[in-house]
Image: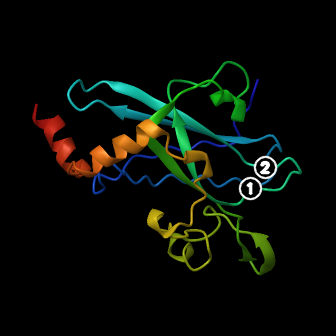
Amino acid sequence: DWTPVGYTDACASVDGDSYSPAYDGYLGLRGTVPRDGVLYVQIDTIELFGRQLRVVGFSVFELFTDTGLLRAGLYQLPVYMGSPNQGPISAASAHGKERVPTCSILLRVLVAPRGFINNEPGRVLSRTLVPREEWVSRGLAVPSPNYRSGAYDSTLCEPQPHERLLYKKRLLRVDKPLRALVGIMNSG
């Protein structure tokens, strides 16, 4: 058994590209998080022509090291086909699963900032305690680095030989804005 300690939903921005959609997902975990805690991400899509909801795949990320330290950082994670293996969700949930070719997610695990709240210094800040207009200045909304900056740890996403071929082919295709694809779905 496993117990969720948080949940969030995110939709791709229609102003993004179809090959590299951007999501606005945010999950702020405060308080006690189990040291065997994992982040489970499931990616769903609506098929362009069939208009059916489908699961693209999933990814899992262990939040803590073996010594109990938060794995703060920027990560590129592979997306695996289907659903996790039976049992508690862990990094082992992806064992034996095939990766969705050329598909990955970018994840940022950040330490919660501390600051003044109600004249109390050193409090752990959260978006529920700080007015929205102060999120950026108080470190609660940190802009994402561009993927091409090399800031993300991509060691888990080394392209496999067949993916290298797919990437070359994909570079020849024009990336359509999601807004255009939504328009196609709505017109038919």
Amino acid marked by disc 2 = Phe
Q: Secondary structure at mark 2?
A: loop
Q: How is the image coloured?
A: rainbow
Quadrant showing the N terminus: top right
Residue 64 circle label: 2
Q: Quadrant of the C terminus?
A: top left
The percent position of residue 97, horizontal first and vertical second, equals: 58, 25
Q: Residues within 10 Å of mark 1 (few under 14, many from 20)?
A: some
Residue 16 lies in what quarter of the image?
A: bottom left
- Compared across the picture, whether 79 is left or right of 122 comes to left
Does 123 appear above or below 52? below
Which of these two is toward me, 132 or 159?
A: 159
Residue occupying image coordinates x 22% and y 50%: 172
- Residue 4 figure quarter: top right
Of callouts 1 and 2, which one flags the residue occurring earlier in the amino acid sequence? 2
Between the C-alphas of marks 1 and 2, the distance is: 5 Å
Instruction: Give whichever of 100, 42 is nearer the camera.
Output: 100
Return the residue found at the far right. 67
Q: Residue furthest left?
A: 187
The residue wearing badge 1 is 71
Q: Residue at x 50, y 52 (%)?
A: 25
The circle drawn on residue 92 is none
Q: Is residue 85 above or below residue 67?
A: above
